[in-house]
Structure formats: structure tokens, C-alpha cells
Image (cartoon, rainbow, N blue to C red):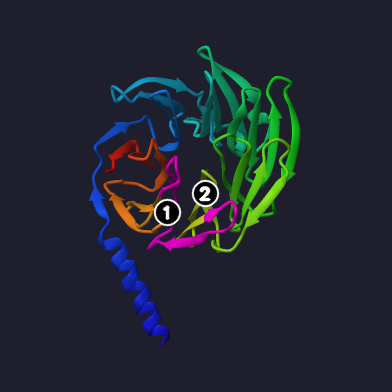
Amino acid sequence: MRKIIFICLGFCLFLSNLGAKDLIPNYSLTTSGGVSDLVLKNEHLYVATTASSVDIFDLKTKEKIDSIIIPKIKDFMNESIDARVYSIDIFDNNLLILSQGESGGRNIDIYKDGKLHKIIEDKDRLFIAYAKFIDENHIIYALLSNQLYLYDIKNKKIITETQISQSKFSNFKLNENKTKLVVADESGILTIINTKDLSQVKKFDTLNLDNVFQVDIKNDVIITAGQDRRCAIYTLDKKNAYFKEASFLIYSAALSPSAKLAAFASDEENNVTVFNINTKENLYKLTQNKSTLTNILFINENEIFVTSDDKKINYYKID
């Protein structure tokens, strides 16, 4: 009986993939290095790279129009190497840049009016993994130790902090109005946080059994990218929860703005599966990604960027 169940499950999975349409990139953008993060604003794509730069692309012309250069750092052999940019964010005309510092530390800068303004220095020895704007004067950043900090830029001080758990931090994402964020870590548990005071609202712990590499939240829907090969879907009201299983570790996942569509890295060939949240039907397979995926970004309901550890950003137009 157990064997029959597994055969039926496998056949259902085969049927759900049968109608998925293979797509190749409509075009690609070439960056300075591997891509770690990206943000879209006003037809400009801001791209964090591993090559000491934030590249800026004009999506109308599909060309790189500028690069913000981050100072190189010294390695343990005292040689100059590129500083990896871990995350970026933009608020008005201010660009938040979290980058690799010396001796394992991290730098947080704000790029404004053509200059880098230091917020946190690597000499503070804070192992910051991710940082985003809440508003013009406040940011939230997370340490690898899974501590979260709300920081006042103007007054240069920490307002409050919290320890999410003893598990290693992986990723966080803010909702659309920046009132809540969802934190993912190596335990597989998701924690919802109020950004105003970093108080914990609720947890989701039923679907992922291991490290969640990435998380996204849109329109009160949450998606995960799991080391356990599970792409989990939750709703904030906890009325709906399920997962789709992949054949390989899922390094990246994202939701469309309406949260009607979702996408996740679904196999060892770095393909991305796009599916319908409500019906669970697989719709498209985005192909020709050459390296391990780092980000999936829905521009809207019909356009998607996919980034990886190489210098290519692939753009796909779906029906």
C-alpha cells in the first residue's frame, strides 16, 4: 500500500509538471560580478555584486548606466581583494549598502549625492548578514547570530534589539508597508516581527524541516526556499499551508506583487518553476541559468528577473 501511495504521488507530480512551459531568457544583463541582491525602482535596477560594486541598469535601454564602487579590503595575506556587497536597499534617493569589511566585519554605508556615508564600520566586528530601510531615518539589520536591531540613522543609535532564536540567521523580508517582517533561519521556523518595536507576532513551524535559505512575503502570503527541498506556502491567517517539493536544494523563491504567482529554484540545473498559488499548478520553467541561483524578482505579474553566482541576470516575459 505504501508503495502504491508513493507511485500515485509521483504520477501526480509528473502530471502537474506536464503542462509547464519551458522559457528561455528574452534578454540578459551583464554585471560586474556574481549577484547577491537587487532592488528595482523607477525603471532602474540596482544590483549588489561580489566585485566591490553596485551596478545600476536602465531597464528602458537595457544598459548599465553607472556603478557605485565599494573600497576593496585586505585579506589575511594583506592583499587587496574585492569586497562582497551582501544586501542593498533604496529609500527616496538614499541607497543602503551592506558590504564585506576586514577581519570578518561588515560595513553599512548610505550612498547619497555621489558619496558614501558610513553608518556602521567593520572595526565594530558586527557580523551583519542583511540590512534594509524601514524609513528614511531607520534601518533594520540582522546578525548571523539571529539578533535583529532597529537602528536610528540620524541619532546614530540602536533603538531596540531582539534575539529571534539560537539558530543561525538566513534571511528576512519586509511586507509592502514595512510594518512587519518575516525572519527565516536554519531551524526552518519562520518568525513574524513588528518593525516598530521588534516584538514577535507569530511563528510558522510546520512545513520546513531544515534551513530556509530565503523567504518572501506579499499580500499576506509567505513563500520559503528550503534546504529540505521544500518550497512552503503559508498565509498570515494560517488558514492555508502546503509545500511543493523539488529534486534539489531550493536556494531562492519569490512571490509576484499580487501573490497569485510564485517561483522557486526547482532542480540541479538551476531552472525556476513558476506556479499558481491557488491551484498549485506549475505554469512555466525558466531555463538557461548557468550558476547557483541567488535571487528571483517579479517586476510585475508578467516579468521576472533571475540572478545567480555568475554575471548574468536573465529576464523572462511570461504570458
- Asked whether, in this view, residue 293 is left or right of residue 93, the answer is left
User: Where does residue 222 sit, x and y in percent of width and height?
Assistant: 52, 50
In percent of width and height, residue 296 lies at 41, 43
Task: Please state the total of marks drawn on the protein image.
Answer: 2
| Mark drawn on residue 86 | none
Q: Residue furthest top?
A: 113
Task: Check disc 1 and report its element: helix, strand or loop.
Answer: loop
Residue nearest the observer in this picture, 187 or 255: 255
Q: Residue at x 68, y 23 (%)?
A: 153
Which secondary structure class fits the magenta region best?
loop
Dot 1 crowding, Cα within 10 Å, few <14, some 14–19, many 20+: some
Image coordinates of residue 187 in percent, x first then y, are: 61, 58
Q: Which residues make up the magenta segment?
A: 234-261
* Residue type, mark 2 in image: Val
Q: Is residue 19 above or below residue 222?
A: below
The front one of 119 and 161 is 161
Tag 1 near tag 2, CB within 8 Å? yes
Q: Residue furthest bottom?
A: 1
Closer to us: 199 or 157: 199
Q: Percent position (x, y) of residue 275? A: 36, 53
Residue underneath mark 1: 277
Marks 1 and 2, the one that precedes in the sequence: 2
Q: Secondary structure at mark 2?
A: strand
Q: CA distance from mark 1 to mark 2?
A: 9 Å
Question: Residue 80 magenta-drawn?
Answer: no
Lateral position of residue 20 relative to residue 152, left or right: left
Which of the 4 image quadrants contains residue 34? top left
Residue that numbered label 2 is attached to: 221
